[in-house]
């Protein structure tokens, strides 16, 4: 006891063997005598609560173990011990709650940052929602947790009435409200779609007629551009801030024309987007088949257009795709470029890529809504 009254430090490691202290504090002998600062050893010998000192970095009080656990790997042991000796001892207060250990607080903050944001409650409209692409696209959008209201619009000559598609989708186990809207052929959408489009955040347009035998791309453009124009003008009036995803062929020509229409109206032409995501989806899938990797972890940028040789997958920009030997790239390019024709041939000319196009459209739509919800 005479040692505590003197100014000389207690001779912990010099005069007494390490095993002397193992029984009084339960700490491993070598750790107690060689790894802890003397102030900590004394507090344990006296059966006191571990001493806490103020970390000047954040002004909070921590034990030596908490401090070293937090700074482990960042500073050497000797530096931490020296820093501990410079820290001001914390005042003992019973009423005040003890701060959480730094490591625990850090993990808690990390978990909070990763905490999922609540799903959005967006209104989405599928114009052409009763068609071959429109129906599966509507199903996939109805399943998106960010969709609170889904509108299905189509002409009265569609394969099934839009109201029937809406009723069918209203039975699935999802929160969104689904409503169908129909219009007679020859009528102007701007005169009939006020209720359907007002308040929309996203409008997907799988509309228009497919290219028929003997039909030139110019003929197709004249027909489908007129259909797209009617819908785009209605959107400009009733939901001018909505994102418009166009699945109208020829998309290379229709999208720039509709963007010019928006520009003349003083609206943002960047709201008009051509959905060519199917080229990306196909490129990812084909690379996955060749490499044996999961296409979910493959992301091939595709630049250019959405027709034949204008489709340019940039395989070198993906870490998995760039492992493919160069002699296979030319063939892979053609596989992506001709994929649409492959589907038409496989269906015996009785259909085109409707299901995969619906998937690609929903993939695009889901990304837009996630971005609007602040989760992109």
Image (spheres, rainbow, N blue to C red):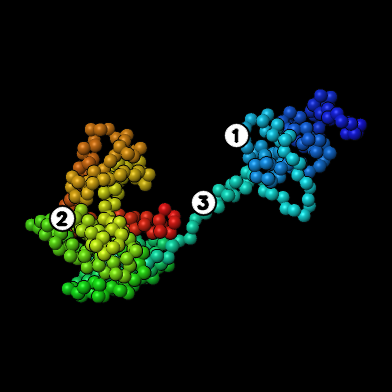
Residue 11, x across and y down, in percent: 83, 27
Res 102 label: none
In the picture as drawn, the residue positioned furthest to the top comes out as: 14
Q: Is residue 13 visible?
A: yes
At 21% across and 39% down in the image, what residue appears? 331
In the picture as drawn, the residue positioned furthest to the left comes out as: 214
In front of the other: 212 or 58: 58
SS of the residue under disc 2? loop
In front of the other: 6 or 153: 6
Which quarter of the picture shows residue 56?
top right
**What's the distance in space between the residues labelled 2 and 1, CA to CA?**
66 Å
- Which of disc 1 and disc 2 is earlier in sequence? 1
Pointer 3 residue = 114
Pointer 1 residue = 74
Pointer 2 residue = 348
Residue 246, x across and y down, in percent: 26, 59
**What's the distance in space between the residues labelled 2 and 3, CA to CA?**
49 Å
Which quarter of the picture shows residue 328?
top left
Residue 151, x across and y down, in percent: 33, 69
């Amino acid at each position: 006891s005479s040692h505590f009254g003197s100014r000389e430090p207690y001779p912990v490691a010099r005069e007494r063997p390490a095993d002397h202290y193992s029984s009084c504090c339960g700490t491993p002998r070598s750790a107690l005598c060689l790894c802890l600062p003397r102030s900590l050893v004394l507090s344990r010998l006296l059966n006191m609560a571990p001493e806490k000192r103020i970390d000047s970095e954040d002004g909070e009080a921590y034990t030596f173990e908490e401090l070293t656990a937090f700074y482990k790997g960042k500073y050497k042991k000797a530096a931490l011990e020296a820093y501990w000796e410079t820290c001001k001892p914390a005042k003992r207060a019973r009423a005040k709650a003890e701060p959480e250990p730094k490591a625990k607080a850090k993990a808690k903050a990390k978990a909070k940052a990763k905490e999922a944001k609540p799903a959005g409650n967006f209104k989405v409209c599928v114009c052409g929602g009763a068609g071959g692409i429109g129906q599966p696209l509507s199903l996939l959008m109805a399943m998106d947790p960010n969709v609170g209201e889904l509108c299905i619009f189509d002409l009265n000559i569609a394969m099934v009435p839009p109201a029937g598609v809406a009723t069918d989708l209203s039975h699935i186990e999802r929160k969104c409200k689904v409503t169908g809207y129909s219009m007679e052929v020859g009528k102007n959408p701007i005169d009939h779609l006020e209720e359907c489009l007002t308040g929309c955040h996203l409008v997907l347009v799988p509309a228009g007629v497919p290219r028929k035998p003997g039909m030139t791309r110019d003929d197709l453009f004249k027909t489908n551009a007129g259909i797209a124009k009617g819908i785009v003008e209605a959107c400009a009036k009733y939901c001018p801030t909505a994102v418009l995803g166009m699945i109208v062929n020829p998309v290379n020509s229709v999208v720039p024309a509709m963007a010019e229409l928006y520009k003349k109206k003083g609206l943002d032409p960047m709201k008009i987007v051509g959905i060519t995501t199917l080229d990306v989806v196909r490129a990812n899938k084909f690379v996955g088949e060749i490499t044996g990797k999961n296409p979910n972890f493959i992301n091939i940028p595709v630049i250019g257009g959405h027709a034949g040789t204008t489709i340019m997958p940039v395989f070198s920009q993906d870490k998995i795709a760039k492992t493919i030997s160069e002699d296979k790239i030319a063939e892979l390019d053609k596989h992506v470029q001709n994929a649409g024709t492959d589907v038409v041939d496989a269906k015996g000319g009785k259909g085109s890529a409707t299901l995969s196009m619906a998937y690609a459209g929903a993939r695009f739509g889901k990304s837009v809504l996630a971005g609007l919800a602040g989760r992109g």
